Amino acid sequence: MKKTVPIAAALLALISGCGGKESGTSATPAAPTPQRTPDVSLVYQPDKSKAQTAAPDLATGEKVYKSTCGICHKSGLKGAPRLGNKEDWEERLTQNNEVLYDRAINGYRGKKGQMPSRGSNSRLSDAEVRAAVDYMVVHAIPSWTLEK
């Protein structure tokens, strides 16, 4: 019995310390991160992800364009913006690059036409599709570079 009282007191002390408010912490939640609003000017930027530290792979983009994308983008089939046609690309270039990549990879149906997923070539990797988008964007406005 003599040992039971000190053990019970120690357990009570330990339990009473649990669940209380820690000192030095604030009950106020952190401020939310502000959402970025896209600019309506030309905002296209190449992918700057960790995986891509070098310049966009325009050689791969050209290869993919010639083998897959050119089928529609050369003539404007199904409303596709034609390679090198500023008017066709202008509205699309007001969106950021991730929107263009997503639509090319996953497909898109819009007011002016449709974009089949991966240009209907399921063998293309995400990187190849992104390279093709970069290639077409560089050619959309001849004086334009990916650095803008």
Image (tube, helix red, strand yellow):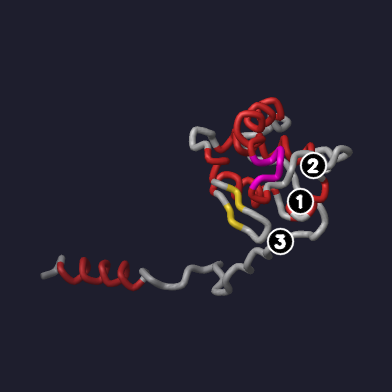
**Residue position for label 3:** 36
Using the numbered discs, state the Cα–Cα distance from disc 1 to disc 2 in whole angstroms. 9 Å
Amino acid at pointer 1: Leu
**Residue position for label 1:** 93
Q: Mark 2 or mark 3, which is nearer the start of the sequence? A: 3
Q: Is residue 114 left or right of residue 14?
A: right
For the C terminus, the quadrant is top right
Q: What residue appears at the point 83 percent right and 38 percent down from the top-left corner? A: 145
Span highlighted in magenta in the image: 72-77
Q: Mark 3 or mark 1, which is nearer the start of the sequence? A: 3
Q: Is residue 135 above or below residue 4?
A: above
Q: Position of residue 111 (x, y in %)?
A: 66, 61
**Residue reaching furthest to the left:** 1
Label 2: element kind: helix
Amino acid at pointer 2: Ala
**Residue position for label 2:** 140
Decide: few, some or many residues near mark 2? Use Cα within 10 Å; few <14, some 14-19, many ≥20: many
Decide: few, some or many residues near mark 3? Use Cα within 10 Å; few <14, some 14-19, many ≥20: few
